Amino acid sequence: MASTPLDLVLVSTPIGYLGSGRGGGVELTITSLLRGLGQRGHHMHLVAPEGSRLPEGCEQVHLHPVAGEDQPSWQHADPDGPVLIPSQGVLPKLWERALDLASTADAVLNFGYDWLPLWLTPRQHQPIFHLVSMGSVARVIDALLLDLARWDQRRLAFHSRRQADDFGLPNPPVVVGNGFDLSRYALQVQTGGPLGWAGRVAPEKGLEDAVSVAARLGEPLLVWGLVEDPAYAARVEAAAPAGTIQWRGFLPTTALQKELGGCRALINTPKWNEAYGNVVVEALACGVPVIAYDRGGPGELVQHGVTGWLVPPDDCDGLLAAVQQLDAIDRNACRHWVECHASQAIFAERVERWISRGLAPGDGSISTCP
Ligand code: UDP
């Protein structure tokens, strides 16, 4: 339990309702915090796009659904492009509601990677905190994030060091990782299953490299996740021998972990500076070793030779060699790492500490606009 329970307003991503899968890993992060912070006695409001449902076990949270059009995703925008907000966009509406609620809350916690909430932060008296969900993808966000960090970096937290490194911050970053409700993931100790891959099916996730490894081994690759870019998915499938990809769809966590847990390894092949890599930890939680590119969050999550193998980025031969060394990995060690470093309780505690420190006056760094 926290020594002082906080009243918090959590603002969801403006891309997809909670449960749609369109918000990617952010959806799981929010779910984990609703549960974890709730267990620590904090009171929460969740402002989220219409259609969102409260996750199981979060019935005490007040949900505020907001209608409006999705924001375009920054990771698929021109890096030098402008800020776009649709005329009926959900983003300003989310913030209108959040700021109303904030007047009686201790803090607002933002999960959306977007311009508006960052811009608002130094211009509001209510303290707004940002758990930044991606690395650098657009200059206009980079610049604003840096301005905010120079004003009061305590308002920012990141999932991994490599993600934070993208932004050239003035001070060492607050890194909170991510958290998983381990009661929802079962350790499976058997070996010899198929190879798996999980994530949004989009170019930055590099599915083609994992497929090429499976094809060279003459094996199928089980693929879970939302097909965000159908044209890309079709191209990857067409380039591999028929039947290599076994599309398993986007599954809820219970079903995903059951199927994923049967794999002999998860292959994780990001082409971008992945902020964290939820699917890496979800696989480990089931006892599945991970073979990942040493890039972004996965490069900090996988313990080379203990919970899997790290391979130089874009090295498909390296992936193949690692698949042949899976016998050296103890599946119990994979689960153990998650229990020690990425449980829901540990994550909630880190986030609580971050916010409490950010709210504390006394070091002269709190400032508000005149
Ligand atoms: N996911 C899921 N069902 C699936 C495949 C993926 O719920 O069938 C979720 C997974 O649990 C993870 C998210 O999709 O939380 C992907 O997050 P990740 O951090 O790996 O990448 P992102 O999409 O945020 O870039």
Image (spheres, helix red, strand yellow):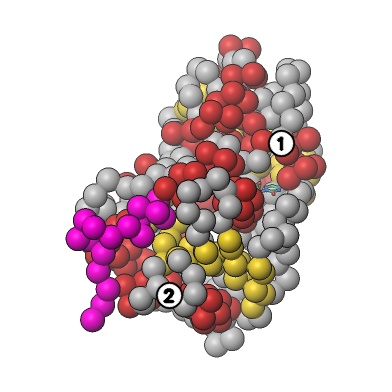
* Left or right, 243 with reference to 237: right
Viewer-closest of 281 and 151: 151
Locate residue 237 relative to residue 165 in the image: left or right. right
Residue 277 versus residue 147 in the image, above or below: above
**Left or right of 211, for residue 275:** left
Name which quarter of the figure residue 339 lies in.
top right
Q: Which residue is mark 2?
A: 116
Residue located 58% across and 52% down the image: 41
Q: How many marks?
A: 2
Q: Quadrant of the C terminus?
A: bottom left
In terms of sequence position, does the residue under pointer 1 or pointer 2 come before the other? Answer: 2
The residue carrying mark 1 is 183
Classed neighbour count for the residue bearing mark 1: other residues with Cα under 10 Å, few (<14), some (14–19), many (≥20): few
Q: Please, is residue 340 above or below residue 72 in the view?
A: above
The residue carrying pointer 2 sits among few (fewer than 14), some (14 to 19) or many (20 or more) residues within 10 Å by Cα, namely some
Q: Residue at x 26, y 77 (%)?
A: 369
- Magenta highlight: main SS: loop
Give SS at disc 2: helix
Q: Quadrant of residue 12?
A: bottom right
Alpha carbon of mark 1 to alpha carbon of mark 2: how far? 36 Å
Residue at 55 percent across and 45 percent down: it is 1
- The segment highlighted magenta reads 354-370
Q: In this orientation, does residue 312 appear?
A: yes
Point out residue 40 in the picture as x, y percentages from the top left corner. 57, 48
Does residue 293 show up? Answer: no
Three-letter residue code for mark 2 = Leu
Q: Is residue 367 magenta?
A: yes
